[in-house]
Amino acid sequence: MKYVIGIDVGTTCTKALLVDEAGAVAGQGSEGYALISSGSCIEQQAQEWTRAVAAAVRQAVQGIDGAQVAAISFSTQGGSTVAVDADGRFLGNAWTWMDGRSTREADEIERQVGGDYIYRTTGWRINPALDAAKLRRMKTLPEYAGAVQYWTTLEVVNGYLTGRPVLDPTNAAMRQLYSVEANDWDPTMLRAAGVRREELPEVLPTGALVGTLLPEAAAELGLPAGIPVYNGAHDQYCASIGAGAVHDGDMLLSAGTTWVVMGIGRKPLFTDSYIAPGKHPVEGLYGAIASLVCSGASLQWFKNNFLPEEFDEMNRVVAQRRGTTGELCFYPYLAGAAYPLWVPNARGAFVGINLEHDRFDFARAIMEGVAFGVRRALDDFRRSGSDIRSITMMGGASRSPVWIQMIASAAQVPILRLNQSDVCALGAASIAACGAGIYESYSAAAAAMVHTEAVYEPIPEEVAYYGEKFRRYDAMWQHMRAYYESAPAAEA
């Protein structure tokens, strides 16, 4: 029996899956780590990524002969960056993809280069959390004077396992220094960031052989040296592979703290709403990403503060409350209204409260408000030419049948729920399995590894109900939007 290992290095946790050649999960492990936050500065120790990789893999491979492991690959968070000196040592902490201290630098780059050029070249609106702005700021600080390169998570863990700190195109695109269509570092963005090409890592295709497992790393992982390591991908692109979204027209909904919609197509999708296109690991395909900020975080915030019941109990009661929440609406803009509305000054709100409402009604209103956000996103994809036949959903919210059904009816699209929640690690395992020759393509890997557990069809009665409620929901938003756009800018 042969095995492969897929490792997902996320924002606060690393997960490892041991998958056999028939596509079944044979072992798993996980290891968490902390964020270091102070105001808009959100950092992480890069050495925690490598420590967690070793710990998670050791758990996953317990009880098997390590000689049976044929390959390893990674899924990683994107846009978290650490400075490295000439001896390969980290200088300070990594600035994560949530770090917002480089707002001034982002504004300077946008004035220098132009917002349209930035978006059309890199696929992303200018963002203080991405590398163009972060590195422009980092390079002015004396504590980074000894830096010779700047690595993100994938380079760190590839380097740890093989001694070769290489990147892939999906993670390179997250740095806002990379041209989506040229598939190379963009000279204009490099100049704007003050970065030389040699200060950035080598880029290899997703799935390319990086090297083999070094003896030192092998001892820490509990594996023999020499196992091939294949280049991984950004977590959202690994999620698409792990969910079987590897064909033109596939759609994916990743429902975590921030919900992410990804469409798969044959050309990069540039829109007035700033959907973010990038090359997909499948040759000839592109991904298109839209982030629904604070979607999952809204319900988690409410539960942490006002709803002591367990999620199962909350779901049971919420499922019975449609009749009491017809006028109650929630706008999930706790961190401003981002895609596709782009009103950063907006704030979250409950509207239509009466004396009969309780905490479960508010929880249902939050779920519906997030479902309406998904509807907005899918409507935007449709206007941009996407033919949406169904959408595959994963993440914590996919464990809530009532929430999935709301989305299916509100967005008028069938929702497929998978039997595996760790789809990013499963996508990395698929990359490893294809690299090892176990499967000839990601489609073949998906056929073996990915299984649909349930399908939620739109219910005609609910489609009519949510269609009318969304009309009123959107009309109220137009009044709120006018208010927020005329109000003084909120302080950070």
Image (spheres, rainbow, N blue to C red):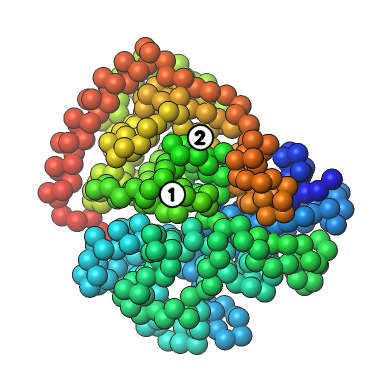
User: Which residue occupies 26% across, 63% down?
Assistant: 117
Quadrant housing the C terminus: bottom left
Does residue 39 appear in this view?
Answer: no
Crowd around label 2: few <14 · some 14–19 · many ≥20 (10 Å): many
Q: Nearer the viewer, mark 1 or mark 2?
A: 1
Please name the residue that numbered disc 2 is placed on.
393
Up the image or down, 489 lies above or below 187; here it is above
Indicate the quadrant where residue 333 lies: top left
Secondary structure at badge 1 equals: strand
Choose between 407 and 294: the one closer to the eye: 407
Residue 402: mark in rendering: none
Does the CB distance between marks 1 and 2 fall below 8 Å? no
User: Which residue occupies 31% across, 73% down?
Assistant: 188
Please name the residue that numbered disc 1 is placed on.
286
Secondary structure at badge 2 equals: strand
Q: Horizontal placement of 392 versus 294: left or right?
A: right
Q: Amino acid at mark 2?
A: Met
Q: Horizontal placement of 114 versus 254: left or right?
A: left
Up the image or down, 211 lies above or below 67; here it is below
Image coordinates for residue 344, horizontal then vertical, percent: 26, 51
Image coordinates for residue 299, horizontal then vertical, percent: 44, 37
Up the image or down, 386 lies above or below 83; here it is above
Image coordinates for residue 42, horizontal then vertical, percent: 45, 64
User: Which residue occupies 22% across, 66% down?
Assistant: 114
| Residues at marks 1 and 2, CA–CA distance in whole angstroms | 19 Å
User: Which residue occupies 34% across, 57% down?
Assistant: 124
Indicate the quadrant where residue 351 lies: top left
Choose between 492 and 371: the one closer to the eye: 371
The mark that comes first in sequence, 1 or 2, is: 1
Image coordinates for residue 121, horizontal then vertical, percent: 33, 62
Q: Amino acid at mark 1?
A: Tyr
